[in-house]
Structures are given as structure tokens and as C-alpha cells.
Image (cartoon, rainbow, N blue to C red):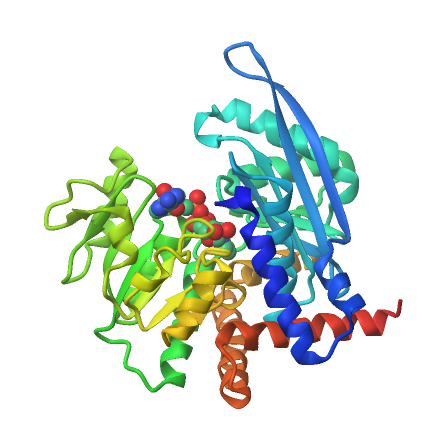
């Protein structure tokens, strides 16, 4: 879980190894490790019960050599500075790997949004923007949704920021369409996973039709990844949310599960679907195992019981460093988060471009550009991995780190 800052230490391990392979100095490694700016603010709000409560908010701007910092805003009880640091640095690598002109940032508020009324959430969000507005904006740091936040939260950020600086839709992405959001943003991360999996299969001459997938997480990424994989002919046989996990070997009835979750808040008791233990889900035999929920879902404790051909990191940092090594030793491919889930930041980039240019792109343009950008990045990683004899994460980090270093060199020190 985030509290032990494993994402940050995993990032540092992967980064150091890449810098060593690329022959970079210790100073460059430090520069790529440290965040350029870290903000922590305290946000007092009056809860609906009349009591005053204080929440800690964070924004970390990791690197902006290649463009303004870009990254989500997370509302979760376990958010802390180290978690945000780790996620911000992953964003720098993600934007560099897919080669879009943005840097990396991340933010969060340590709170449990499930216990908040819409009014409380709105007040919390607006106060956070009031505290940090000088440091964010279309040319410096652009926020987006992440766990516990959504288009509505981005709408409040847009409104609060625009109240200070004038109409500024490009200051935040993942907004509702009515405020300048992009078509395709909602499904972008899941769609991107589908494209990356398609390229993975092509690279290995595999037929997707009839392959099986198991997905942990039934939120934006999990559901849309499941839909994208089904369109490719992959059979999704098990899925879970934070409370339940269901299994159906002939393939899940996904839309019934979506409806059941919407109506009852649970995946349980859908006919033909067997309920299984959450831990058993990750150990289900399948072709593609897709952690799409939280950090550190796969650790040294359960990595030995993963029975998949490939793990596709739909979540950010779902594997600990130890789990990564165990899977590598066992010959299980890991398609790293900085590639697998980059669809979201790519369509966020399209939204930013549309807002800056006062344009509205049709869905076909968003989809074909997404396919081109993430498809190119995936092919690049698979090729580099084969040519250099590297695992996929090392190949992805080498490409991304070299791009950030090139920009740093070009800016001069
Ligand atoms: P979400 O809040 O929409 O969904 C998260 C899901 O995970 C929920 O269904 C929740 O019930 C489930 N979950 C939580 N704890 C769980 C547990 N212990 N076991 C099983 N399921 C559990 O969040 P999301 O937007 O889908 O994001 C999921 C992950 O993907 C995060 O790591 C996020 O950083 C990453 N990500 C999201 C996007 C995006 O566009 N939304 C882009 C890139 C990366």
C-alpha cells in the first residue's frame, strides 16, 4: 500500500538501473530522482455535521524539461508525500516514453471521498485550488482525475482556477465535455491497454481470440480495459472490486456486472458468476493478468503464485520491486505501467491541445491519434527489448530516461 512508499523506491530502483545502463553520472541520476517542486498544504473544511476537519493536500512537480508537468489528483486515505512523489516521477517517464511534450506531476488529498457529501467534496477541492493556484496552470502544471476524483472534481478545479485567471480550460483535463473535456478521455486508459495488448500479441505472433484475462479493479480502468479486451476477442474470466471477486470460465457478462455494481454497489450474486476470494483472483490461471486497482497488489508474497503469460500493469505501481524480479525470473512478461496505462495521459494531452487551440476533435481523430501514439510507443518498447535483450520495463525506462536527459541537456544547466 502507498504508506510504505514502495512506488517511490521502485521508481528509484528502475531509474538507477536505467541510468547505469545508459552510462549517466550520479548527479544526473539524482536530478532525475528528485522532484523539482513539492507542495504540501493543510485544508480546513466544515463537514456537514458542523465539525471542523483538516486534510493534507499535496502537489509534486517532478520534471518539466519536456513540457508542463502533467498528472492526476488522487483522493484516498493513504495519500502521502512519498506516494505522490513516486507517482509524479512515473508521470515524467510516461510522458517521455510516449513522446508527448509534457513533464510529470501528481497530487492528492489524504481523505476518504466515499464519506464525503458532494458539497464537502466541492469545498475541499475549491479550497485546495485556492491554496495552490499560483503553482498550477496550462503552462506549468495540469491536473487530471485519478483514484477518488472524476470529471466533476475537474469541473470544480476549472471553475475555481478560471475565477482567478479568466476562462482557462487548458488548466485541467478530464473535465466534463460541457466544459471543454475531450471525447474519449473517459475510456482512454482502458482503450490504450487494448492497443498495447494488441501490439504485444502481434510482436509475439499470438492470437488474441480466445485468450483469457483476469482483472483486479472494477473502476474506470478495469471496466474499460475489460471492454477493450473483449472487443479484441479476449475472454475476461474474473474481475474484482474492493469488496468482491467473481469468476466465470466461459467469460464474464460484463455489462450485467456493471449494472449490478451501479444498482447495488457490489458484484456479488450475479447468476452464473462464482464468487471467489480476492487473493485467489490474482492466482487464477490466465493469459493476461491485469492489476487495475491499487499499488503493490503483487508482492514477493504472491508473485510466485501468478500463473499468467503476461502481467499488464494497468494500475500505477501494482508490482513491488521484489515481485517484478520474481516474475522476471519465472519468465512472465510484465508490460510496465508507464506504457500500459499511458492512454489516459495521451488523451489528456489531446484535451489540453484542443483547449489551447479552441478546437473540438471528433471521436475518430482522438481514437486514431491515440492508436498512433501509444501503438508507436509499444512497438518501440517491444523492439528495444528484443534488440537489447532487456525485459520490457528496463527497455521502457531506457527509452524514457534518455528522452528526459536529452531535453535536460538541451535546456542547459
Ligand atoms: P477507480 O477509483 O475508478 O477504480 C478503482 C477500482 O479498484 C475500484 O473498483 C475499487 O473498488 C477497486 N479496488 C480498490 N481496492 C481494491 C482491492 N484491494 N482489490 C480489488 N479492487 C480494489 O480508479 P481508476 O481510475 O480505475 O484507477 C485505477 C488505477 O489505474 C490507479 O492505480 C490509477 O492511478 C491508475 N490509472 C488510472 C488512469 C485513469 O485514466 N483513470 C490512468 C492511468 C493510471
Q: Residue at x 58, y 39 (%)?
A: 155
Residue 195 visible, this orientation: no
Q: How many marks?
A: 0
Whether 80 is drawn above or below 409: the answer is above
From the image, which quarter does the C terminus lie in?
bottom right
Q: Is residue 272 above or below residue 330?
A: above
Any part of residue 20 in sight: yes
Q: Residue 344's spot in the image, x, y percent?
A: 52, 58
Is 99 in front, or is 162? 99
User: Which of the 4 quarters of the picture holds residue 299?
Assistant: bottom left
Considering depth in this image, is 264 or 19 the residue closer to the camera? 19
Q: Nearer the viewer, residue 323 or 37?
A: 323
- Residue lying farthest to the right in this orientation: 413
Q: Residue at image x 56%, y 39%?
A: 79
**Of residues 151 and 340, which is closer to you in this image?**
340
Q: Position of residue 197 (x, y in %)?
A: 39, 72
The residue lying at 38 percent from left, 57 percent from top is: 291
Please indicate whether residue 285 sits to the left or right of residue 359 in the image.
left
Please indicate whether residue 402 sits to the left or right of residue 313 in the image: right
Q: Residue furthest top?
A: 50
Q: Position of residue 380 (x, y in %)?
A: 54, 81
Q: Is residue 233 above or below residue 279?
A: below
Residue 64, given in percent of the width and then of the height, sits at: 75, 59
Amino acid at each position: 500500500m502507498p504508506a510504505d512508499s514502495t512506488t517511490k523506491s521502485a521508481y528509484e530502483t528502475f531509474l538507477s538501473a536505467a541510468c547505469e545502463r545508459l552510462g549517466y553520472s550520479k548527479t544526473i541520476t539524482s536530478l532525475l530522482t528528485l522532484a523539482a517542486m513539492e507542495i504540501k498544504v493543510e485544508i480546513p473544511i466544515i463537514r456537514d455535521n458542523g465539525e471542523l476537519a483538516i486534510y493534507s493536500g499535496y502537489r509534486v512537480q517532478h520534471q518539466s524539461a519536456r513540457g508542463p508537468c502533467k498528472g492526476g489528483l488522487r483522493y484516498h486515505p493513504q495519500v502521502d508525500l512519498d506516494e505522490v512523489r513516486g507517482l509524479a516521477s512515473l508521470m515524467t517517464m510516461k510522458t517521455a516514453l510516449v513522446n508527448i511534450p509534457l513533464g510529470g506531476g501528481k497530487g492528492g488529498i489524504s481523505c476518504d471521498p466515499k464519506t464525503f457529501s458532494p458539497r464537502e467534496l466541492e469545498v475541499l477541492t475549491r479550497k485546495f485550488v485556492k491554496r495552490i493556484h499560483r503553482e498550477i496552470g496550462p503552462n506549468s502544471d495540469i491536473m487530471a482525475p485519478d483514484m477518488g476524483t472524476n470529471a466533476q472534481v475537474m469541473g470544480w478545479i476549472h471553475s475555481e482556477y478560471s475565477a482567478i485567471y479568466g476562462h482557462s480550460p487548458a488548466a485541467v483535463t478530464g473535465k466534463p465535455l460541457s466544459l471543454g473535456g475531450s471525447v474519449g478521455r473517459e475510456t482512454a486508459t482502458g482503450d490504450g491497454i487494448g492497443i498495447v495488448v494488441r501490439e504485444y500479441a502481434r510482436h509475439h505472433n499470438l492470437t488474441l481470440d480466445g485468450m483469457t484475462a483476469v482483472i483486479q479493479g472494477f473502476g474506470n480502468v478495469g471496466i474499460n480495459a475489460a471492454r477493450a479486451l473483449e472487443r479484441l476477442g479476449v475472454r475476461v474470466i474474473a474481475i474484482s472490486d474492493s469488496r468482491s471477486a467473481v469468476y466465470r470460465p466461459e467469460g464474464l457478462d460484463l455489462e450485467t456486472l456493471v449494472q449490478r455494481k451501479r444498482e447495488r454497489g457490489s458484484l456479488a450474486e450475479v447468476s452464473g458468476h462464482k464468487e471467489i476470494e480476492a487473493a485467489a483472483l490474482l492466482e487464477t490461471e490466465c493469459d493476461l493478468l491485469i492489476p487495475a486497482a491499487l499499488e503493490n497488489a503483487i508482492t514477493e508474497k504472491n508473485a510466485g503464485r501468478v500463473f499468467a503469460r503476461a502481467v499488464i500493469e494497468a494500475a500505477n505501481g501494482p508490482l513491488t520491486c521484489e515481485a517484478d524480479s520474481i516474475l522476471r525470473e519465472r519468465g512472465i512478461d510484465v508490460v510496465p505501467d508507464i506504457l500500459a496505462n499511458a492512454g489516459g495521459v495521451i488523451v489528456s494531452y489531446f484535451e489540453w491541445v484542443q483547449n489551447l487551440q479552441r478546437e473540438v476533435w471528433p471521436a475518430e481523430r482522438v481514437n486514431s491519434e491515440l492508436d498512433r501514439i501509444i501503438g508507436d510507443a509499444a512497438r518501440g518498447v517491444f523492439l528495444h527489448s528484443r534488440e537489447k535483450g532487456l525485459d520490457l520495463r528496463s527497455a521502457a525506462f531506457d527509452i524514457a530516461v534518455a528522452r528526459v536527459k536529452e531535453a535536460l541537456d538541451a535546456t542547459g544547466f
